[in-house]
Amino acid sequence: MTSRTISYRLILLSSLIWCLLILSAPVMKHVEVPTVAGPIYAFFSRICHQIDSHSLHLFSEKLGVCARCSAIYFAFLLSVSFYPLFVRKNLPSRVRSYTKREATLLVVSVIPLLIDVGLDLTGIQNSTLPSRLITGGLVGFALPLVLLPAAEEAFGELRHRIPLSSRR
């Protein structure tokens, strides 16, 4: 298996598990399993404010993270899922000419999010559920376009440094 395949599958699987955890918190709370729901919410509270009014709900319970974070993570999963359909597989990872273009796309996708957060924090304009979903989704969708090629290259470098005798 190539380093490209291994890194892709690891990121896809990790992203899927992450998103399932986000969804499992309200499901576990709904089916009244607080011993599972509580630790999941506590884990995600370290990375997200989890304000109820800023969150999406499932079974009348908020997700593990707010709407903007949910949009980032689920758009990331969607983008990773479709990544193989759009990547130029015939180019070696070190000579990909599209990496700078995708990095620019990521920077551009962050600008609306920063504007939305900035306007909300200054009190000029309150951010809304749709604005949180759109701005988070833009970042989440663009992030794998930069992260996956970088992970492929890093994983390839790691595989070259491991002596052949230790590989199985």
Image (tube, grey):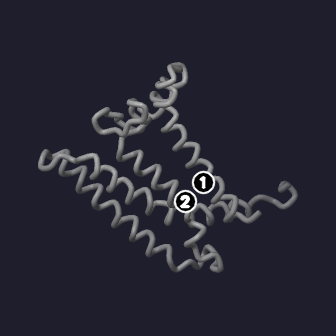
Total marks placed? 2
Say few, some or many: other residues with alpha carbon within 10 Å of mark 1 (under 14 / 14 to 19 / 20 or more).
many
Q: Which corner quadrant holds the C terminus? A: bottom right
Where 76 falls versus 149 (above or below)?
above
Going by the numbered disc 2, the residue's amino acid type is Val
Front residue of 24/159: it is 24
Q: In the rendered view, does 132 fall on the left or right side of 70?
A: left
Where 106 falls versus 122 (above or below)?
below
Q: Residue furthest right?
A: 165
Q: Residue at x 70, y 63 (%)?
A: 3
Going by the numbered disc 1, the residue's amino acid type is Leu
Where 148 falls versus 67 (above or below)?
below
User: How far is mark 1 from mark 2, CA to CA?
Assistant: 6 Å
Say few, some or many: other residues with alpha carbon within 10 Å of mark 2 (under 14 / 14 to 19 / 20 or more).
many
Q: Residue furthest front?
A: 59
| Cβ atoms at labels 1 and 2 below 8 Å apart | yes
Q: Which residue is mark 2?
A: 80
Front residue of 65/33: it is 33
Q: Which corner quadrant holds the N terminus? A: bottom right
Q: Which residue is mark 1?
A: 12
Label 2: element kind? helix
Q: Residue at x 62, y 73 (%)?
A: 93
Please provide percent x and percent y for residue 6: 69, 59
Q: Looking at the rendering, which quadrant does residue 44 occupy? A: top left
Please provide percent x and percent y for residue 106: 40, 65
Front residue of 150/4: it is 4
Query: Which mark is first along the chain, 2 or 1?
Result: 1
Q: Residue at x 36, y 34 (%)?
A: 50
Q: Residue at x 64, y 75 (%)?
A: 89
Label 1: element kind? helix
